Image (spheres, rainbow, N blue to C red):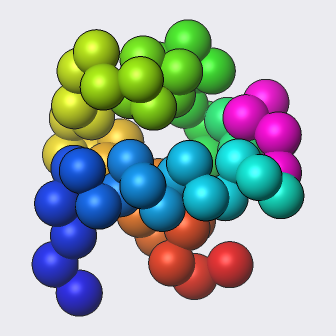
Amino acid sequence: MRVTQEELRNLYKERLKREKQTYISEMINISPSILSKFKTGKFDLYPNLFERLKDYLTNS
């Protein structure tokens, strides 16, 4: 499944309605501040971080 940064951002925002950012951060080992900046569109995730978040959002 090929997902763009914007599509992943939207998936992440939807998930935040059910889970806390801190919890997701701990589960995928990405800093909450990085996730926050990603969520607001301040920057895109590096490929390895992108894959971790994509795997978490699409497989759980």
Quadrant of residue 18 in the image? bottom right
Q: Which residues are magenta?
A: 19-23
Whether 2 is drawn above or below 32: the answer is below
| Residue depicted at x 22% and y 50% | 5
| Residue depicted at x 63% and y 21% | 32
Q: Pinpoint residue 41: horizontal percent, then vertical percent.
A: 30, 25
Whether 12 is drawn above or below 41: the answer is below
Can residue 30 be found in the magenta stretch?
no
Quadrant containing the C terminus is: bottom right
Judged left or right of residue 34, residue 27 is right
| Residue depicted at x 53% and y 52% | 12
Q: Pinpoint residue 6: horizontal percent, then vertical percent.
A: 24, 50
Whether residue 16 is visible to the viewer of this picture, yes or no, is yes
Judged left or right of residue 23, residue 10 is left
Whether 15 is drawn above or below 2: the answer is above
Looking at this rendering, what residue extends furthest in the bottom direction? Answer: 1
